[in-house]
Protein backbone atom coordinates (compact mmCIF):
# COMPACT_ATOMS: atom_id res chain seq x y z
CA UNK A 1 0.00 0.00 0.00
CA UNK A 2 1.09 3.56 -0.73
CA UNK A 3 -0.23 6.72 0.89
CA UNK A 4 -1.30 9.52 -1.45
CA UNK A 5 -2.01 13.05 -0.21
CA UNK A 6 -3.86 15.37 -2.58
CA UNK A 7 -2.37 18.85 -2.21
CA UNK A 8 -2.67 20.46 -5.65
CA UNK A 9 -5.60 22.77 -4.88
CA UNK A 10 -4.97 26.51 -5.11
CA UNK A 11 -6.69 27.36 -1.81
CA UNK A 12 -8.52 30.42 -3.14
CA UNK A 13 -11.05 30.37 -0.29
CA UNK A 14 -8.21 30.79 2.21
CA UNK A 15 -6.74 33.89 0.62
CA UNK A 16 -4.85 36.02 1.50
CA UNK A 17 -3.00 33.38 3.57
CA UNK A 18 -2.61 31.14 0.50
CA UNK A 19 -1.33 33.92 -1.75
CA UNK A 20 2.18 33.02 -0.57
CA UNK A 21 1.96 29.49 0.87
CA UNK A 22 0.06 26.28 0.11
CA UNK A 23 -2.87 25.67 2.43
CA UNK A 24 -1.22 22.44 3.59
CA UNK A 25 1.36 24.62 5.36
CA UNK A 26 -1.13 26.51 7.50
CA UNK A 27 0.40 26.38 11.00
CA UNK A 28 -1.17 24.54 13.90
CA UNK A 29 0.73 25.30 17.11
CA UNK A 30 3.92 26.01 15.23
CA UNK A 31 3.79 22.98 12.92
CA UNK A 32 2.37 22.83 9.36
CA UNK A 33 -0.93 21.02 8.91
CA UNK A 34 0.59 18.47 6.53
CA UNK A 35 3.36 17.55 8.99
CA UNK A 36 0.87 15.96 11.38
CA UNK A 37 -0.27 13.52 8.69
CA UNK A 38 3.23 12.82 7.36
CA UNK A 39 4.47 11.93 10.84
CA UNK A 40 1.57 9.51 11.34
CA UNK A 41 2.05 7.85 7.95
CA UNK A 42 5.76 7.39 8.60
CA UNK A 43 4.91 5.63 11.88
CA UNK A 44 2.85 3.20 9.80
CA UNK A 45 5.83 2.65 7.46
CA UNK A 46 3.96 3.81 4.37
CA UNK A 47 5.63 5.30 1.30
CA UNK A 48 4.13 8.76 0.80
CA UNK A 49 3.26 10.46 -2.48
CA UNK A 50 2.02 14.05 -2.48
CA UNK A 51 0.27 15.49 -5.53
CA UNK A 52 1.07 19.20 -5.90
CA UNK A 53 0.65 21.90 -8.51
CA UNK A 54 3.71 23.26 -10.26
CA UNK A 55 3.34 26.73 -8.71
CA UNK A 56 4.18 25.40 -5.25
CA UNK A 57 6.57 22.62 -6.22
CA UNK A 58 9.65 24.40 -4.86
CA UNK A 59 7.81 25.26 -1.63
CA UNK A 60 7.12 21.58 -0.97
CA UNK A 61 10.59 20.45 -2.10
CA UNK A 62 12.39 22.85 0.23
CA UNK A 63 10.38 21.87 3.30
CA UNK A 64 9.40 18.19 3.04
CA UNK A 65 10.93 16.97 -0.22
CA UNK A 66 13.27 14.53 1.55
CA UNK A 67 10.37 12.79 3.34
CA UNK A 68 8.02 12.15 0.41
CA UNK A 69 7.76 11.70 -3.33
CA UNK A 70 6.22 14.68 -5.12
CA UNK A 71 4.07 14.24 -8.23
CA UNK A 72 2.96 17.24 -10.29
CA UNK A 73 -0.65 17.45 -11.45
CA UNK A 74 -0.13 18.75 -14.97
CA UNK A 75 -3.41 17.74 -16.60
CA UNK A 76 -7.04 18.32 -15.68
CA UNK A 77 -8.68 19.82 -12.63
CA UNK A 78 -10.23 18.15 -9.62
CA UNK A 79 -9.50 15.37 -7.16
CA UNK A 80 -9.90 12.60 -9.74
CA UNK A 81 -7.36 14.24 -12.03
CA UNK A 82 -5.02 14.57 -9.03
CA UNK A 83 -5.27 10.86 -8.23
CA UNK A 84 -4.80 9.98 -11.90
CA UNK A 85 -1.45 11.81 -11.77
CA UNK A 86 -0.01 9.04 -9.55
CA UNK A 87 -1.08 6.19 -11.82
CA UNK A 88 2.52 5.54 -12.91
CA UNK A 89 3.82 5.78 -9.34
CA UNK A 90 1.88 2.78 -7.99
CA UNK A 91 2.01 -0.80 -9.17
CA UNK A 92 -1.01 -2.52 -10.69
CA UNK A 93 -1.80 -4.54 -7.56
CA UNK A 94 -1.22 -1.92 -4.84
CA UNK A 95 -3.93 -0.51 -2.62
CA UNK A 96 -3.93 3.22 -1.97
CA UNK A 97 -4.52 5.13 1.24
CA UNK A 98 -5.80 8.45 -0.11
CA UNK A 99 -6.11 11.64 1.94
CA UNK A 100 -7.13 15.22 1.24
CA UNK A 101 -4.32 17.55 2.29
CA UNK A 102 -6.51 20.21 3.94
CA UNK A 103 -8.21 17.99 6.56
CA UNK A 104 -7.19 18.03 10.24
CA UNK A 105 -8.02 15.06 12.46
CA UNK A 106 -8.02 15.23 16.23
CA UNK A 107 -7.43 11.47 16.44
CA UNK A 108 -4.87 10.39 13.86
CA UNK A 109 -5.33 6.79 14.97
CA UNK A 110 -8.30 6.62 12.63
CA UNK A 111 -5.84 6.36 9.71
CA UNK A 112 -4.65 2.95 10.91
CA UNK A 113 -8.27 1.87 11.43
CA UNK A 114 -9.02 2.73 7.79
CA UNK A 115 -6.02 0.66 6.69
CA UNK A 116 -6.96 -2.34 8.84
CA UNK A 117 -10.63 -2.38 7.80
CA UNK A 118 -11.41 -5.72 6.12
CA UNK A 119 -13.01 -4.21 3.03
CA UNK A 120 -10.68 -3.37 0.18
CA UNK A 121 -12.50 -0.08 -0.41
CA UNK A 122 -13.24 2.23 2.53
CA UNK A 123 -14.36 5.84 2.89
CA UNK A 124 -14.30 7.83 6.13
CA UNK A 125 -17.67 9.25 7.22
CA UNK A 126 -17.95 12.26 9.53
CA UNK A 127 -21.07 13.89 10.98
CA UNK A 128 -21.23 17.68 10.65
CA UNK A 129 -23.75 20.45 11.28
CA UNK A 130 -23.58 21.85 7.72
CA UNK A 131 -23.69 18.81 5.41
CA UNK A 132 -24.87 20.77 2.37
CA UNK A 133 -21.37 22.27 2.12
CA UNK A 134 -19.81 18.83 1.55
CA UNK A 135 -20.23 15.53 -0.25
CA UNK A 136 -22.98 13.68 1.64
CA UNK A 137 -22.67 9.90 2.01
CA UNK A 138 -25.70 7.70 1.42
CA UNK A 139 -25.15 4.32 3.09
CA UNK A 140 -27.31 1.29 3.85
CA UNK A 141 -27.86 -0.41 7.23
CA UNK A 142 -24.62 -2.37 6.75
CA UNK A 143 -22.64 0.86 6.35
CA UNK A 144 -22.02 0.14 2.69
CA UNK A 145 -21.83 3.18 0.42
CA UNK A 146 -24.61 3.62 -2.12
CA UNK A 147 -23.92 7.14 -3.37
CA UNK A 148 -22.09 10.40 -2.71
CA UNK A 149 -24.15 13.54 -3.34
CA UNK A 150 -22.04 16.68 -3.75
CA UNK A 151 -23.33 19.72 -1.83
CA UNK A 152 -27.05 18.91 -1.93
CA UNK A 153 -29.53 21.65 -1.09
CA UNK A 154 -31.55 19.16 0.99
CA UNK A 155 -29.03 16.67 2.43
CA UNK A 156 -30.43 13.19 3.14
CA UNK A 157 -28.20 12.97 6.24
CA UNK A 158 -25.43 14.81 8.07
CA UNK A 159 -22.85 12.12 7.30
CA UNK A 160 -20.26 13.53 4.91
CA UNK A 161 -17.11 12.49 3.12
CA UNK A 162 -14.25 12.86 5.61
CA UNK A 163 -11.54 12.96 2.96
CA UNK A 164 -9.79 9.66 3.74
CA UNK A 165 -10.13 6.55 1.55
CA UNK A 166 -8.64 3.10 1.19
CA UNK A 167 -8.98 2.14 -2.46
CA UNK A 168 -8.10 -0.95 -4.46
CA UNK A 169 -6.26 -0.71 -7.80
CA UNK A 170 -9.62 -0.87 -9.64
CA UNK A 171 -10.15 2.81 -8.80
CA UNK A 172 -8.14 3.81 -11.88
CA UNK A 173 -10.62 1.87 -14.03
CA UNK A 174 -13.48 3.99 -12.65
CA UNK A 175 -11.53 7.22 -13.08
CA UNK A 176 -11.65 6.56 -16.83
CA UNK A 177 -15.46 6.32 -16.81
CA UNK A 178 -16.39 9.67 -15.23
CA UNK A 179 -16.96 13.02 -16.92
CA UNK A 180 -16.49 16.59 -15.71
CA UNK A 181 -18.76 17.89 -12.97
CA UNK A 182 -20.87 21.09 -13.38
CA UNK A 183 -17.91 23.10 -12.04
CA UNK A 184 -15.67 21.70 -14.79
CA UNK A 185 -13.62 19.32 -12.64
CA UNK A 186 -13.10 15.57 -12.53
CA UNK A 187 -14.39 14.54 -9.10
CA UNK A 188 -13.01 11.56 -7.24
CA UNK A 189 -16.35 11.20 -5.47
CA UNK A 190 -18.01 10.49 -8.84
CA UNK A 191 -15.58 7.61 -9.41
CA UNK A 192 -16.12 6.23 -5.88
CA UNK A 193 -19.90 6.48 -6.30
CA UNK A 194 -19.62 4.57 -9.56
CA UNK A 195 -17.41 1.96 -7.91
CA UNK A 196 -20.00 1.45 -5.15
CA UNK A 197 -22.51 0.20 -7.77
CA UNK A 198 -20.42 -2.90 -8.47
CA UNK A 199 -17.98 -3.22 -5.55
CA UNK A 200 -18.39 -2.98 -1.81
CA UNK A 201 -17.28 0.37 -0.36
CA UNK A 202 -17.40 0.39 3.44
CA UNK A 203 -18.26 3.61 5.29
CA UNK A 204 -16.13 3.84 8.44
CA UNK A 205 -17.64 6.38 10.81
CA UNK A 206 -15.37 8.70 12.77
CA UNK A 207 -16.52 10.46 15.92
CA UNK A 208 -13.46 12.58 16.81
CA UNK A 209 -12.60 16.19 15.99
CA UNK A 210 -12.51 16.83 12.24
CA UNK A 211 -12.22 20.04 10.26
CA UNK A 212 -11.82 20.82 6.59
CA UNK A 213 -9.74 24.00 6.68
CA UNK A 214 -11.49 25.80 3.86
CA UNK A 215 -12.19 29.34 5.10
CA UNK A 216 -9.90 31.83 6.83
CA UNK A 217 -11.55 31.64 10.26
CA UNK A 218 -11.05 27.85 10.25
CA UNK A 219 -7.38 28.61 10.99
CA UNK A 220 -8.50 30.10 14.30
CA UNK A 221 -10.85 27.19 15.03
CA UNK A 222 -8.27 24.45 14.49
CA UNK A 223 -5.64 26.19 16.60
CA UNK A 224 -8.20 26.77 19.34
CA UNK A 225 -9.00 23.05 19.40
CA UNK A 226 -5.29 22.21 19.56
CA UNK A 227 -4.77 24.62 22.47
CA UNK A 228 -7.79 23.24 24.32
CA UNK A 229 -6.21 19.80 24.05
CA UNK A 230 -2.75 20.68 25.31
CA UNK A 231 -1.63 17.96 27.69
CA UNK A 232 1.07 19.96 29.44
CA UNK A 233 2.74 23.33 29.94
CA UNK A 234 6.35 23.97 28.94
CA UNK A 235 8.65 26.88 29.57
CA UNK A 236 12.16 26.70 28.15
CA UNK A 237 12.37 30.41 27.38
CA UNK A 238 13.82 33.32 29.33
CA UNK A 239 11.14 34.82 31.59
CA UNK A 240 12.11 37.96 33.52
CA UNK A 241 10.87 38.85 36.99
CA UNK A 242 7.33 40.12 37.54
CA UNK A 243 5.82 38.16 34.63
CA UNK A 244 2.48 36.46 35.35
CA UNK A 245 1.77 33.18 33.56
CA UNK A 246 -1.64 31.59 34.08
CA UNK A 247 -3.00 28.30 32.69
CA UNK A 248 -1.41 25.95 30.14
CA UNK A 249 1.27 27.84 28.24
CA UNK A 250 4.06 26.59 25.97
CA UNK A 251 7.08 28.90 25.73
CA UNK A 252 9.70 27.54 23.35
CA UNK A 253 13.47 27.85 23.48
CA UNK A 254 14.95 31.30 22.97
CA UNK A 255 11.71 33.18 23.67
CA UNK A 256 12.06 36.23 25.93
CA UNK A 257 9.19 37.42 28.11
CA UNK A 258 9.98 40.78 29.66
CA UNK A 259 8.87 42.18 32.99
CA UNK A 260 5.26 43.04 33.84
CA UNK A 261 3.83 41.04 30.96
CA UNK A 262 0.71 38.90 31.58
CA UNK A 263 0.20 35.64 29.69
CA UNK A 264 -3.02 33.64 29.96
CA UNK A 265 -3.26 30.11 28.64
CA UNK A 266 -3.93 28.14 26.68
CA UNK A 267 -1.30 29.88 24.58
CA UNK A 268 1.64 28.90 22.38
CA UNK A 269 4.78 31.08 22.11
CA UNK A 270 7.35 29.93 19.54
CA UNK A 271 11.14 29.99 19.46
CA UNK A 272 12.86 33.35 19.55
CA UNK A 273 9.77 35.43 20.33
CA UNK A 274 10.21 38.73 22.16
CA UNK A 275 7.28 39.87 24.29
CA UNK A 276 6.93 43.01 26.38
CA UNK A 277 7.58 44.62 28.70
CA UNK A 278 3.99 45.32 29.79
CA UNK A 279 2.37 43.07 27.12
CA UNK A 280 -0.90 41.17 27.52
CA UNK A 281 -1.18 37.81 25.75
CA UNK A 282 -4.71 36.46 26.13
CA UNK A 283 -6.03 32.88 25.77
CA UNK A 284 -5.96 31.05 22.41
CA UNK A 285 -3.07 33.09 21.06
CA UNK A 286 -0.45 31.37 18.87
CA UNK A 287 2.80 33.23 18.21
CA UNK A 288 5.10 31.47 15.76
CA UNK A 289 8.89 31.73 15.76
CA UNK A 290 10.62 35.12 16.10
CA UNK A 291 7.46 37.18 16.59
CA UNK A 292 7.89 40.49 18.45
CA UNK A 293 5.10 41.91 20.61
CA UNK A 294 5.79 45.43 21.88
CA UNK A 295 5.07 47.20 25.14
CA UNK A 296 1.43 47.87 26.10
CA UNK A 297 0.22 45.64 23.26
CA UNK A 298 -2.64 43.14 23.63
CA UNK A 299 -3.11 39.98 21.54
CA UNK A 300 -6.30 37.96 21.92
CA UNK A 301 -7.22 34.60 20.28
CA UNK A 302 -5.07 35.26 17.21
CA UNK A 303 -2.42 33.58 15.09
CA UNK A 304 0.71 35.64 14.39
CA UNK A 305 3.09 33.95 11.95
CA UNK A 306 6.89 33.93 11.75
CA UNK A 307 8.99 37.11 12.01
CA UNK A 308 6.01 39.45 12.36
CA UNK A 309 6.15 42.54 14.56
CA UNK A 310 3.20 43.96 16.52
CA UNK A 311 4.76 47.00 18.25
CA UNK A 312 3.73 49.19 21.17
CA UNK A 313 0.19 50.41 21.81
CA UNK A 314 -1.44 47.97 19.38
CA UNK A 315 -4.41 45.57 19.69
CA UNK A 316 -5.03 42.38 17.70
CA UNK A 317 -8.16 40.32 18.36
CA UNK A 318 -9.52 37.16 16.68
CA UNK A 319 -7.24 37.62 13.69
CA UNK A 320 -4.77 35.78 11.47
CA UNK A 321 -1.57 37.73 10.84
CA UNK A 322 0.78 36.39 8.17
CA UNK A 323 4.53 36.02 8.05
CA UNK A 324 6.89 39.05 8.10
CA UNK A 325 4.08 41.54 8.81
CA UNK A 326 5.16 44.84 10.39
CA UNK A 327 2.54 47.00 12.10
CA UNK A 328 3.10 50.67 12.84
CA UNK A 329 2.63 51.72 16.47
CA UNK A 330 -0.98 52.09 17.52
CA UNK A 331 -2.42 49.69 14.94
CA UNK A 332 -5.81 48.42 16.13
CA UNK A 333 -7.88 45.57 14.69
CA UNK A 334 -11.55 45.77 15.63
CA UNK A 335 -13.26 42.39 16.14
CA UNK A 336 -16.88 43.19 17.10
CA UNK A 337 -19.67 44.95 15.21
CA UNK A 338 -21.72 47.63 16.99
CA UNK A 339 -24.88 45.57 16.45
CA UNK A 340 -23.06 42.38 17.56
CA UNK A 341 -24.28 40.48 14.49
CA UNK A 342 -22.25 37.65 12.96
CA UNK A 343 -19.32 38.99 10.99
CA UNK A 344 -19.26 38.35 7.25
CA UNK A 345 -16.21 38.06 5.03
CA UNK A 346 -15.61 37.93 1.30
CA UNK A 347 -14.69 34.38 0.30
CA UNK A 348 -13.99 33.64 -3.36
CA UNK A 349 -16.25 36.45 -4.54
CA UNK A 350 -19.14 35.75 -2.18
CA UNK A 351 -20.15 37.44 1.07
CA UNK A 352 -20.16 34.62 3.64
CA UNK A 353 -21.12 34.63 7.30
CA UNK A 354 -18.32 33.39 9.53
CA UNK A 355 -20.76 32.24 12.21
CA UNK A 356 -18.66 34.26 14.66
CA UNK A 357 -19.67 37.41 16.51
CA UNK A 358 -16.00 38.19 17.05
CA UNK A 359 -13.67 38.14 14.07
CA UNK A 360 -10.92 40.60 13.28
CA UNK A 361 -8.79 40.67 10.13
CA UNK A 362 -7.03 38.13 7.92
CA UNK A 363 -3.72 39.65 6.86
CA UNK A 364 -1.38 38.12 4.28
CA UNK A 365 2.40 37.86 4.41
CA UNK A 366 4.75 40.88 4.19
CA UNK A 367 2.06 43.53 4.89
CA UNK A 368 3.09 46.90 6.32
CA UNK A 369 0.91 49.39 8.21
CA UNK A 370 1.76 52.94 9.22
CA UNK A 371 1.10 54.32 12.69
CA UNK A 372 -2.43 54.66 14.11
CA UNK A 373 -4.12 52.43 11.54
CA UNK A 374 -7.57 51.01 12.37
CA UNK A 375 -8.80 47.83 10.66
CA UNK A 376 -12.53 47.00 10.85
CA UNK A 377 -13.99 43.52 11.55
CA UNK A 378 -13.99 40.94 8.75
CA UNK A 379 -11.39 42.69 6.58
CA UNK A 380 -8.84 40.85 4.42
CA UNK A 381 -5.55 42.49 3.51
CA UNK A 382 -3.58 40.88 0.69
CA UNK A 383 0.10 39.96 0.82
CA UNK A 384 2.64 42.77 0.30
CA UNK A 385 -0.03 45.48 0.79
CA UNK A 386 0.89 48.77 2.47
CA UNK A 387 -1.53 50.78 4.61
CA UNK A 388 -0.96 54.54 4.89
CA UNK A 389 -0.62 56.02 8.41
CA UNK A 390 -3.88 56.98 10.11
CA UNK A 391 -6.06 55.04 7.67
CA UNK A 392 -9.32 53.35 8.61
CA UNK A 393 -9.41 50.14 6.59
CA UNK A 394 -13.11 49.59 5.84
CA UNK A 395 -12.83 47.31 2.79
CA UNK A 396 -10.67 44.42 1.61
CA UNK A 397 -7.23 45.44 0.35
CA UNK A 398 -5.81 43.69 -2.70
CA UNK A 399 -2.46 41.94 -2.90
CA UNK A 400 0.30 44.54 -3.26
CA UNK A 401 -2.11 47.50 -3.00
CA UNK A 402 -1.16 50.82 -1.38
CA UNK A 403 -4.24 51.74 0.68
CA UNK A 404 -4.90 55.29 1.86
CA UNK A 405 -8.15 56.49 3.44
Image (cartoon, rainbow, N blue to C red):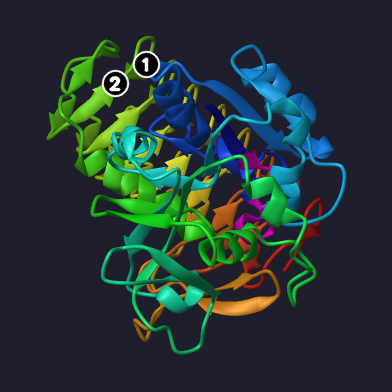
Corner quadrant of residue 144: bottom left
The location of residue 351, given as percent across then percent down, is 60, 80
The outermost residue toward the front is 198
Q: Is residue 9 magenta?
A: yes
Q: Residue sitting at 60 percent across and 51 percent down?
A: 363
Instruction: Answer with the quarter of the image where residue 63 lies.
Output: top right
Q: Quadrant of the C terminus?
A: bottom right
**Could you tell whether 61 is left or right of 372 in the image?**
right
**Crowding at mark 2 (Cα within 10 Å: few <14, some 14-19, many 20+):** many
Q: Which residue is mark 2?
A: 251
Extent of the magenta region: 6-16
Q: Nearer the viewer, residue 1 or 131?
A: 1
Residue 2 lies, with reference to residue 151, above or below; the image says: above
Residue at 31% over, 63% down = 143
Q: Report which residue position mark 1 lands on.
A: 255
330 vs 123, nearest the viewer: 123
Which mark is in front, 1 or 2? 2
Residue drawn at (64%, 57%) of the image: 188
Can residue 299 be spotted in the picture?
no
- Name above or below for residue 215 compared with residue 39: below
Residue 353, image x, y percentages: 48, 78
- Tell me, yes or no, if residue 148 can be seen here: yes
Q: Above or below — where is 341 with respect to 47?
A: below
Q: CA distance from mark 1 to mark 2?
A: 7 Å
Residue closest to the eye, 20 or 299: 20
Kind of element beneath mark 2: strand
Left or right: where 44 falls relative to 380: left
Q: Nearer the viewer, residue 160 or 217?
A: 160
Q: Is residue 284 magenta?
A: no
**Residue 365, percent across and down?**
66, 41
Contact (CB < 8 A) between labels 1 and 2? Answer: yes
Q: Is residue 265 left or right of residue 114?
A: left
Amino acid sequence: MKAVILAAGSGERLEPVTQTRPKQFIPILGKPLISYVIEELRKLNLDIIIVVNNAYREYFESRIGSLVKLVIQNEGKGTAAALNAVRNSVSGNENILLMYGDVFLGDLGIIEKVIREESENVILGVRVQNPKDYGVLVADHNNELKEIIEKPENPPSNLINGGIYKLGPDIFHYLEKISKSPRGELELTDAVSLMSKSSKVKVLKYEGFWIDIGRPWDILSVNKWALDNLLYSKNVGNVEDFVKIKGKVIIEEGAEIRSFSYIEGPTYIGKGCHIGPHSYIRPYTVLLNDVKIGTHTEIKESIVMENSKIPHLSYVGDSVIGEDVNFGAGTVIANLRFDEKEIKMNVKGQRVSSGRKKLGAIIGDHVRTGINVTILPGIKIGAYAKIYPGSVVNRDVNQGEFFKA
